[in-house]
Image: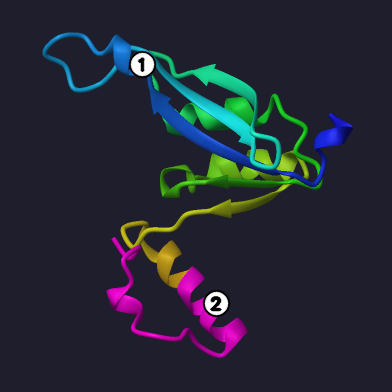
């Protein structure tokens, strides 16, 4: 996988719509996949088990990939200790979404960015990504 070093891995969970049983909201088959943005290549998928969820499946998927020197991005759902540890173990960097409902973590990130850049422009509370 040396050709894929220093790339951007996008991680996303999906439901296979054709597997939604009648009367249910969610599909019976759910997968989490990693793809390389630069080439549009899907490098791996892990089926999310019946008694688990995307949060548990993402670290499993990341352990299968050569992350050295690459950036892994994922939505706020995957801003979890196990996910970040899997990225660090693979010697990659992370770009994970943040939401205000993640306790003090959101405030810590906000304060860190404000200190590093001398403050954030605009009205932070009215940002559309604040919920």
Residue under the image location 61 percent in, 26 percent down: 61
Residue under the image location 33 percent in, 72 percent down: 127
Q: Nearer the viewer, residue 24 or 82?
A: 24
Q: Is residue 31 visible?
A: yes
User: Could you say which quadrant of the image residue 4 lies in?
Assistant: top right
The outermost residue toward the left is 23
Would residue 16 be found to the left or right of residue 55 on screen? left
84 in relation to 104, above or below: above
In space, the residues marked 1 and 2 are separated at their CA atoms by 38 Å
The residue stretch that appears in magenta = 109-131
| Quadrant (top left/top right/bottom left/bottom right) for the C terminus | bottom left
Q: Position of residue 100 (x, y in %)?
A: 34, 63
- Asked if disc 1 and disc 2 are in contact, CB closer than 8 Å, the reply is no
Q: Nearer the viewer, residue 40 or 60?
A: 40
* Mark positioned earlier in the residue sequence (1 or 2): 1
User: Could you say which quadrant of the image residue 64 lies in?
Assistant: top right
Q: Position of residue 103 (x, y in %)?
A: 35, 61
Dot 2 crowding, Cα within 10 Å, few <14, some 14–19, many 20+? few
Would residue 13 be found to the left or right of residue 20 on screen? right
Residue under the image location 75 percent in, 46 percent down: 70
| Quadrant (top left/top right/bottom left/bottom right) for the N terminus | top right
Dot label at residue 51: 1
Q: Position of residue 111 (x, y in %)?
A: 49, 78
Q: Is residue 112 magenta?
A: yes
Element carrying mark 1: loop
**Which residue lies under the disc numbered 2?**
113
| Count of numbered labels shown in the rendering | 2
Would residue 39 be found to the left or right of residue 22 on screen? right
């Amino acid at each position: 996988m040396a050709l894929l070093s220093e790339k951007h891995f996008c991680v996303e969970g999906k439901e296979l719509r054709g597997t939604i049983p009648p009367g249910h909201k969610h599909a019976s088959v759910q997968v989490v996949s990693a793809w390389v943005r630069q080439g549009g290549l899907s490098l791996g998928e892990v089926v999310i088990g019946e008694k688990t969820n995307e949060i548990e499946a993402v670290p499993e998927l990341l352990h299968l990939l050569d992350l050295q020197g690459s950036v892994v991005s994922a939505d706020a759902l995957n801003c979890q200790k196990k996910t970040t540890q899997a990225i660090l173990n693979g010697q990659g960097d992370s770009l994970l979404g943040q939401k205000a409902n993640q306790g003090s973590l959101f405030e810590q990130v906000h304060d860190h960015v404000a200190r590093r850049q001398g403050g954030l422009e605009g009205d932070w509370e009215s940002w559309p990504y604040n919920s």
